[in-house]
Image (spheres, grey):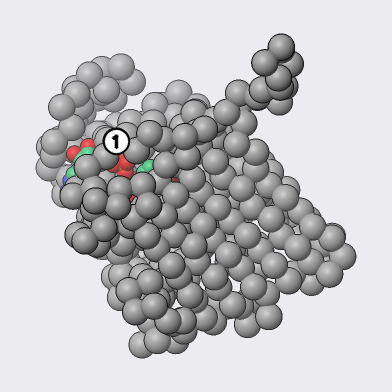
Amino acid sequence: MTRIALVGAGRIGTHHARTIAREVEGLDLVLLADPLAPRLDDLAAELGVPAITRDSSGTVSADVDAVVITSPAARHVELIEACAAAGRHVFTEKPLALTVADAERAASAAGEAGIILQIGFNRRFVEAWASAARAVRAGSVGSVQRIGSLTRDPGPFTADPARIAPATIFNETLIHDFDTLNWLNAGSEPVEVYALAEALIRPDAEDSGFRDSAVVTIRYDNGALATAEASFCAMYGYDLRGEVLGSRGMVQMGEPTSSGARLFTAAGKSVATAGTDTSRYHAAYRDELRVFARAIAGEDVDYPGAADGVRAQRIAAAAIRSAAENRPVTIEEVSR
Ligand SMILES: NC(=O)c1ccc[n+]([C@@H]2O[C@H](COP(=O)([O-])OP(=O)(O)OC[C@H]3O[C@@H](n4cnc5c(N)ncnc54)[C@H](O)[C@@H]3O)[C@@H](O)[C@H]2O)c1
């Protein structure tokens, strides 16, 4: 049994902790760490986790084999480096880092230490996306020409823009789409990026640099053209979709619905829309952690690793610069 610690028991950390404790064989959650989470004791008691700590660096010196990092993004790199130095395997929530240089540092630390470093790009584990990727790899759509990916968070948008870093829409939301596009266009590299970003939901916060809506185009070296789109507020619920168009066909993924049922009444036809990421896609969050357990156990499994984190980070960096300077930015420019 792999002894595991989880660092950062906020929204996604709490979900991952519950999933590990209840639904992932092979992982024994023995420590929860969070400097601030008010109900850390309650979560430990609920899940039967024997220890908690307010010192996140304590997880690395603790007697564990692996660490799940679900702290804020700005803390990922330092925790990954500490885990690597201590020889602990890591599952880190996305993004790997907030800059290309930091992402490369984290990847090097993991590579030199020989640890497993899995990134929480859970969209790869959603059944429709996994099937689509298999179909693309099998050649069912032919050579890839257009790829699209979108992420819309459920509304209403109630967060305080002042507490959200300006590049969050690229570094933390679209990073999923950037990885998805790279993964669906496997074997090709992104070359050039053009991004537009606006504060359409909270225009009053625009002057502070806050952006809540973005569209990104990416040109790949196999000629494929990709688009990624994100919004912080879809009033109908959580919405993920994707599409690959190739020379022989097309594959589509995602429906912003939580049920296949269609209700017909005098008012017309309706479907239930999806609530949140963790309610709609729980199985994907569970399956990525099951794969982490299997990777640690030595099984040959596919997972998004450090190199994937760095590749997605380069697109994010190019998109951030492109939106700021209103011009296409090459991946080479952000890789120097
Ligand atoms: N894969 C996904 O779909 C998904 C969904 C949500 C969030 N995330 C990612 O997960 C991470 C956390 O997001 P969240 O929404 O849970 O945030 P959150 O703010 O709800 O939780 C973060 C937690 O980390 C704690 N924390 C603060 N500083 C820390 C430190 N130095 N060490 C350890 N813990 C610390 C905070 O007290 C808080 O409890 C982010 O990187 C985010 O992008 C991924």
Residue at screen point 26% across, 58% down: 206
Give the residue at x 19% y 24%. 39
Q: Is residue 15 left or right of residue 83?
A: right
Q: Residue 305 or 146: which is nearer the viewer?
A: 146
- Name the quadrant containing residue 107: bottom left
Q: Is residue 131 visible?
A: yes
Residue 90 location in percent, x, y?
Answer: 37, 52
Residue 327 sits above or below residue 173 on the image: below
Q: Residue furthest top?
A: 266
Give how far across and how far down residue 79 sits, in percent. Answer: 24, 55
Query: Which quadrant of the figure contains the C terminus?
Result: bottom left
Would you name the residue on which mark 1 appears? 158
Three-letter residue code for mark 1: Thr
- Please tell me which residue is depicted at 30% across the width and 52% down the height of the picture: 203
Name the residue nearer the viewer: 122 or 32: 122
Where is residue 281? Give x, y as percent: 54, 35
Examine the rendering and report whether any part of residue 5 can be seen: no
- The answer to which quarter of the image holds residue 47 is top left
Q: Quadrant of the N terminus?
A: top left
Q: Is residue 142 above or below residue 233?
A: below
Which residue shows up at 65% across the image and 24% down it?
271
